[in-house]
Amino acid sequence: MKIRQLVILLLVVAVVVGVLAILTAAEEERERTEGERERQRPSREERIESYLGVLKEKLAPTDEQWKTLEPKLRSMIDARLEVQRMYFARISRIRGLSGRTRFAEAMEEEKETPQGQLYELLKDESAKEDAIKAKLEAVRAAREEERQKDRERSRELRRQINELEAELKKLINIRQEAILVLHGIIP
């Protein structure tokens, strides 16, 4: 009877050790592939260069035409990427802090901001309601100011995009325009 119990105990230990080994190996593999993905991800400038290469091939411009098109296309792509970045930053703010950053860690880094100050105040269970209201109003005012700046920057980018669209349309033929529309460069 004791041998049977010992065998069962050894089997249970072997299974537990095996599961732990598998979980550890899986975690190490995930961390390794995540690190490789980060190193392999091209920079913004590299992505723009690659995309310009594709556009040059598709548009088939003359060398002379490309000299005038390329800087305008680069500016257009850059402006559109900035609009996208602002949009996703706004969504992140709406949803709150997510991803790898933990909320508490982010608040620690932002101690001097109204959000960080409110967070610190809320740690104190005995904080007065008036103090909380004041900090809450400061957070709302700071967020409104940030939204206002984003709106102004977005209007400026849209104006720049509209100007670039008009300039590009003057430089290209109808086939090239169709290609740029399909690629989302111009509407």
Image (spheres, grey):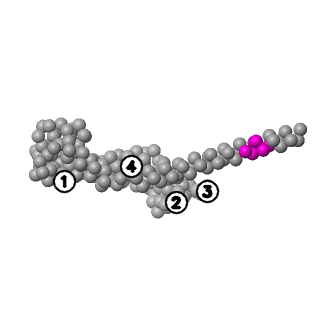
Horizontal and vertical percent for residue 32? Answer: 51, 52
Q: Which mark is residue 89?
A: 4
Q: Which residue is mark 2?
A: 108
13 to the left or right of 103? right
If you read the primary sequence from the N terminus, does the residue marked by circle 2 or circle 1 appear first? Answer: 1
Q: CA distance from mark 3 to mark 1?
A: 59 Å
Which residue is labeled 1 in the image?
A: 71
**Residue 98's spot in the image, x, y percent?**
48, 48
Mark 3 and mark 1 lie on one chain; the one further toward the N terminus is 1
Look at the numbered discs 4 and 3 and tell me whether their residues touch, using CB distance below 8 Å: no
State the SS at label 4: helix
Whether the magenta-drawn stretch holds residue 12 is answered as yes
* Mark 1 and mark 4 residues within 8 Å of each other at the beta carbon: no
Task: Please provide percent x and percent y for residue 146.
Answer: 36, 53
Query: Identity of the amino acid at label 2?
Result: Glu
Give the amino acid type for the residue marked by disc 3 in the picture.
Answer: Ser
The reply to whether the C-beta atoms of the residues labelled 2 and 1 are less than 8 Å apart is: no
Q: How many marks?
A: 4
Going from N to C along the chain, the mark reached first, 1 or 4, is: 1
Q: Please report whichever mark, 4 or 3, sits nearer to the chain's N-terminal start.
A: 4
Secondary element under disc 3, as helix, strand or loop, is: loop
Determine whether, in the image, residue 73 is placed left or right of residue 1.
Answer: left
- Side of 132 where 153 appears, left or right: left
Answer with mark 2 or mark 3, whichever residue precedes in sequence. 2
2 or 1: mark nearer the eye: 1
Q: Nearer the viewer, mark 2 or mark 3?
A: 2
Image point (23%, 37%), residue name: 182
The CA span between labels 1 and 4 is 27 Å
Query: Which segment did they paint magenta?
Result: 9-14
